[in-house]
Amino acid sequence: MKKGRIIKLIGGQYTVKDEQGKNSVVKPLGVFRHQEIDPKVGDIVTYDDNSIVAVDERVNALIRPPIANVDQAILIHSAKSPAFSFFLLDRFLTLVEHENITPVIIVTKIDLMSESALEELKQTMQYYAQFYQVYFTSVHQAKSLEIMKALLVDKVSVFAGQTGSGKSSLLNAIDVNLSIKTGEISKALGRGKHTTRHTELLEVHGGLVADTPGFSKLDFYDMEVEDLLHCYPDFSVLSETCKFRMCLHINEPGCSVKKAVESGAILPQRYENYKLIHEEIKAQKKIYRKK
Ligand SMILES: Nc1nc2c(ncn2[C@@H]2O[C@H](COP(=O)(O)OP(=O)(O)OP(=O)(O)O)[C@@H](O)[C@H]2O)c(=O)[nH]1
Ligand SMILES: [Mg+2]
Ligand SMILES: [Zn+2]
């Protein structure tokens, strides 16, 4: 019996990597189906020459992309084409926080942005840097790629971000042996589809990385409004002094978060995004209940 990690799943065939780095292609035991055990990419498993015989307990498990035991989500946002969006950033952060996975914010393609626009973006991103790791990069900037490399060592990372944001290009720049297919941004956006589609953990600079169309739907169907209480670290530090213990910071009196928005201690646009996401979750629940 051996122990290893599932790194790829295609057509019911699982590729498992052992601690020495040797890959084997195996299938799960037939009884798994009755036991409702469904091995995922990222799972640590016990296996013999033919079969996966046991799956270790998971630390976490994403549904989209279907990956288990993720250490961090690397959120790739392009400075330009597609344009940087704080709304998209806050959506990604909310989803990743909800999964209890550490987010890392990467602003890429900074070579496409004017110096003044980049300076302004960096200013605003300082707000996020109080709570998250934030890095600026471009495939043409070797120094920033070194920082990206250091992030990956010994970790299981999921690269996420909208189509065309430059996820695959960054990975190719970090490791020239990868040669992942990348897309023409205009075409990708026109189709509304990701160039990268299947789920696989790639070995990149001493770590494992899923370059994924992940979180592509970016919806909040798995969430209740109360879940938002744990998704905003900048609000959480203040919410202890809100009048109501379960304050959602919308219309409640004596809300410390709203006070902080007024004073500028909380980024007003982030609070606006929070309210939109709150509304969206509420509306989605109504549709659900009607059914
Ligand atoms: N100028 C510039 N262009 C970049 C950079 N990174 C990526 N691009 C371009 O952006 C386009 C899209 O890049 P991809 O790496 O395919 O984007 P992706 O996030 O993997 O997209 P999907 O797989 O569809 O989700 C390609 O044409 C890249 O050449 C960068 O740092 N600077
Ligand atoms: Mg890609
Ligand atoms: Zn409040």
Image: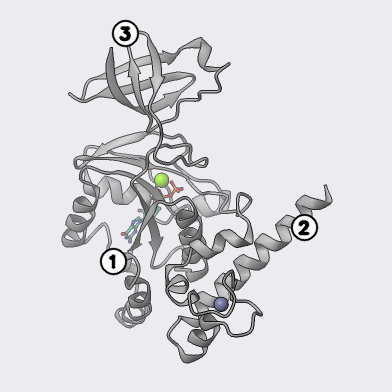
Task: Indicate the position of residue 95 as horizontal and vertical percent values.
Answer: 50, 55
Name the outermost residue toward the bottom. Answer: 263
User: N-terminal of the two: label 2 or label 1?
Assistant: 1
Residue type (three-letter) at the residue carrying disc 1: Phe
Q: Are marks 3 and 2 in contact (CB under 8 Å)?
A: no
Q: CA distance from mark 2 to mark 1?
A: 40 Å
- Mark 2 Cα shell of 10 Å, populated few (<14), some (14-19), many (≥20): few
Q: CA distance from mark 1 to mark 3?
A: 45 Å
What residue is rendered at 34% in x and 15% in y?
A: 47
| Residue 28 position by quadrant | top left
What residue is rendered at 46% in x and 80% in y?
A: 267
Identify the element where label 2 is drawn. helix
Question: Quick check: 179 above or below 288?
Answer: above
Q: Which residue is mark 1?
A: 136
User: N-terminal of the two: label 1 or label 3?
Assistant: 3
Q: Does mark 3's beta carbon lie closer than 8 Å to ligand 2?
A: no
What residue is rendered at 38% in x and 27% in y?
A: 56
What residue is rendered at 52% in x and 90% in y?
A: 262
Residue type (three-letter) at the residue carrying disc 2: Lys
172 displayed left or right of 84: left
Q: Which of label 2 and label 1 is nearer to you?
A: 2
Q: Which residue is mark 2?
A: 286
Identify the element where label 1 is drawn. strand
The type of colouring in the image is one colour
Q: CA distance from mark 3 to mark 2?
A: 50 Å
Identify the element where label 3 is drawn. loop
- Mark 3 Cα shell of 10 Å, populated few (<14), some (14-19), many (≥20): few
* Total numbered labels placed on residues in the image: 3
The label shown at residue 49 is 3
Name the image quarter holding the N terminus: top left
Name the outermost residue toward the top. Answer: 49
